[in-house]
Amino acid sequence: MDLALLRTFVMVHRAGSFTRAAALLGLSQPAVTAQIRALERQLGRPLFLRQARGVTPTSLGDELAHKAAPHLDALVEIVQSGLDDPASQRTLHLNGPPEFISERALPALTALVEDGHRMALRASFGHAEASLEGLAAGHYDLAITTARPRGTLLTATALCDEEHVLIAGPRWAARIAPGVLRLKGAPAMESMPVVEVHESLPLVTRYWAEVFDALPSTSGTVIVPDLRAVLTCVISGAGFAVLPRYLCTAALERGEVVALLDPPIPPLRTYFLVVRSGTLALPHMAWAHEWLLRAALDWD
């Protein structure tokens, strides 16, 4: 079986589209189509179901991708690292939420580099769906997401849980008498402005559903796409927000913000380390994966 055909097949499987795979491979779309058809003729069975928007792998396609992709990734690693230099530096491409990558992952992985492992880091930011799509397409080596991927192409390992806290600046917190929020629940917050990362209020909505068994009845007053900026706005008096505890612990200790409620069961969100199946056989991937799991044991 031609390795070039297998490489094209794996890229189509990861990209979910002949067109996207062609762009990633630097080939024309007709060339990719012809290679997939040639491979299907060799196997005597279809590998993909053609649809209006992309392709869906058949059961044979999924099985072949699961078997072939790790070995192809390993061959690419050998070529990129160099056969004659076993100590050559490898590059890890990491993607995930900007706050978590900046505050948690990068400090841990920088310590890995300082420990003497010959590895370069390249970090980029993205939400869960984009991170998983980019990982599957080969743009990243490792993704940190709050979504567990489906199927066998990607492998996810639970990394840590983060507790969400309802906070406000002291001025806004003083407007809610002690016990009122616990007694009245969500209605006690209706007149207070909201600071969030998106118009859909993802963190507030989740908190409201889990703690108050309700949906927020307000819209965002300040929308900024970074949780660290959300915290800065809350400290400045812009309103209330729901944030991971690790991001606001120092501000809580300094009195810059106040925790408005201490529910008996606080909302938690799980982060996952996600890789393409089979790539943990590569040394630099295994180092980074294990290092992050160890670092997470010390994260509050």
Image (spheres, rainbow, N blue to C red):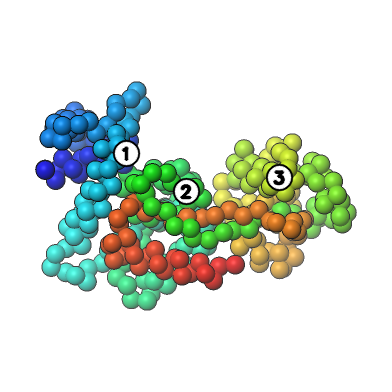
Q: CA distance from mark 2 to mark 1?
A: 18 Å
- For label 2, the residue is 148
Q: Secondary structure at mark 3?
A: helix
Question: Residue at position x 12%, y 35% from top?
Answer: 42
**Displayed quadrant of residue 219:** top right
Q: Amino acid at mark 1?
A: Ala
Q: CA distance from mark 3 to mark 2?
A: 23 Å
Question: Residue at position x 35%, y 47% from top?
Answer: 152
Compared with 205, 100 (above or below) is below
In percent of width and height, residue 128 lies at: 48, 46
Q: Amino acid at mark 2?
A: Arg
**Residue closest to the far top:** 52
Q: Camera-side residue: 36 or 197?
A: 36
- For label 3, the residue is 208
Q: Residues within 10 Å of mark 2 (few under 14, many from 20)?
A: some
Question: Residue at position x 20%, y 40% from top?
Answer: 8
145 lies left or right of 70: right
In percent of width and height, residue 227 lies at: 59, 52
- For label 1, the residue is 15
Q: Amino acid at mark 3?
A: Trp
**Displayed quadrant of residue 173:** bottom right
Compared with 7, 156 (above or below) is below
**Which label was assigned to residue 189?**
none
86 lies left or right of 171: left
251 lies left or right of 117: right
Q: CA distance from mark 1 to mark 3?
A: 36 Å
Q: Are marks 2 and 1 in contact (CB under 8 Å)?
A: no
In percent of width and height, residue 69 lies at: 25, 49
Check the picture and name the quadrant holding the C terminus.
Answer: bottom right
Q: Secondary structure at mark 2?
A: loop
Query: How many marks are shown on the rendered structure?
Result: 3
Q: Residues within 10 Å of mark 1 (few under 14, many from 20)?
A: many
